[in-house]
Image (cartoon, grey):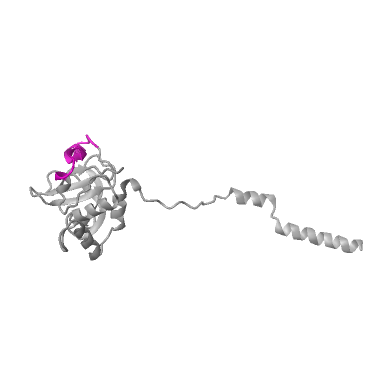
Amino acid sequence: MPYTFLLLLIFSLGQCSSIEPPIEDIDNDIDEEIELPTEPELPDTTVLHIEIARSNQGKPSTDSINVWLEFVGLGPGLPWCAAAQSAWLHQADVISPRIKTGLASNFINQTDPRTHISAGRVLAGVETVPKGSLVVLQRGNTIYGHIGASTIDWKGPNGVYISGNTSAPGGAEATGGEVWEKPIRINPNAYMRITTFVIVEYE
């Protein structure tokens, strides 16, 4: 009987040692770098109109473009950069500007001048354009142009903006039928040039 008991005791100890690793093995496991899951990046609700624009990046459907045009009282097939911007601003429920227009220059003509920043002052580094501000371009000396929204705080000649009815980076600004976020430069001598920034105000 004592012999049998001794065999059982040895067997039991062998089982325990196979389950629990040595202390140094446990320490090694703890020392290993553990990669924690990261939180998904949330939309920036302080510039919600930019997030809405980004959600349409690429080539929007004809139905979407027609909805933006209809929102400002225009029919299908017309230039739609300002119409899309109007719709996105209203969708984001901004305080200003809240105009409905298919003409980019109306974002200057029909808004409070106190919300305007001249491109010349930004180019000279005198003022910084807050992220989310509208970027208004003029075509020559006409009333026509283009519009987008700055996706960075902008000071100096170079910025980044997102706009509708444009081409991919490197292409024409006011044609292309797509939505793109891309670099843009203040050049007072260009035919299609940035003239004014309009600050967007939320509550």
Residue 187 visible? The answer is no
**Location of residue 118 with respect to 76 vertically, above or below:** above
Residue farthest to the right? Answer: 1
Q: Nearer the viewer, residue 178 or 72?
A: 72
x, y (%) of residue 156? Answer: 23, 40
Seen in the image, is 48 located left or right of residue 197? right
Seen in the image, is 46 located left or right of residue 174? right
x, y (%) of residue 61? Answer: 25, 64
User: Which residue is drawn at the image coordinates 78% and 58% (left, top)?
Assistant: 13
Residue 53 visible? The answer is yes
Q: Quadrant of the C terminus?
A: top left
Q: Which residues are magenta?
A: 108-127
Does the magenta portion include 123?
A: yes
**Location of residue 193 with respect to 128 vertically, above or below:** below
User: Which residue is drawn at the image coordinates 43% and 53% (left, top)?
Assistant: 40
Give the quadrant of residue 87: bottom left
User: Which residue is drawn at the image coordinates 16% and 45% (left, top)?
Assistant: 110
Q: Quadrant of the N terminus?
A: bottom right
Residue farthest to the top? Answer: 126
x, y (%) of residue 85? Answer: 23, 52
x, y (%) of residue 148? Answer: 22, 50
Give the quadrant of residue 124: top left
